[in-house]
Amino acid sequence: MIAANPEPLWFKSSYSGGSGTECVECAYVAGGAMVRDSKRAGGPEVRVQDEAWRTFVRAVNQGRIR
């Protein structure tokens, strides 16, 4: 059995711009994902439920959200 990691493993979104001013980080967690501003690692985090996250990612991949 693999032990659950107590800390989310954050990664920078591939959709973040390269200028360093609009960086978004994501972390997959049980039941969904978390999103935060990479410049404010200790700041607020938004938790999104599984189905809502999949719907959002699908819409971005299909070009319905920019």
Image (cartoon, rainbow, N blue to C red):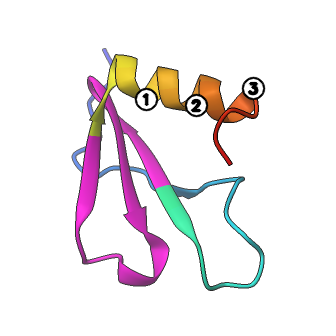
Mark earlier in primary sequence (3, 2): 2
Which residue: 47% across, 74% down?
Answer: 38
As shown in the figure, which amino acid type bears the numbered disc 2?
Val
- CA separation, marks 2 and 1? 6 Å
The residue that label 3 is drawn on is 62
Q: Which mark is residue 53?
A: 1
In the picture, measured across the screen, residue 61 lies left or right of residue 9, that is right
Q: Quadrant of the N terminus?
A: top left
Q: Which residue is mark 2?
A: 57
State the residue at coordinates (75%, 26%). 62
Front-lying residue, 59 or 24 = 59
Q: Residues within 10 Å of mark 1 (few under 14, many from 20)?
A: some
Badge 1 element? helix
Q: Amino acid at mark 3?
A: Gln
The residue lying at 58 percent from left, 31 percent from top is 57
Q: Position of residue 43 (x, y in %)?
A: 24, 76
> Mark 1 touching mark 3, by CB under 8 A?
no
Decide: marks 2, 1 in contact (CB < 8 A)?
A: yes
Binning the other alpha carbons within 10 Å of mark 2 as few (below 14), some (14 to 19) or many (20 upward) gives few
Residue 5 picture location, percent across and down: 29, 41
Give residue 17's mark.
none
- x, y percent for residue 11: 55, 56
Q: Which residues are magenta?
A: 26-47
Check contact, mark 3 vs mark 2: CB within 8 A.
no
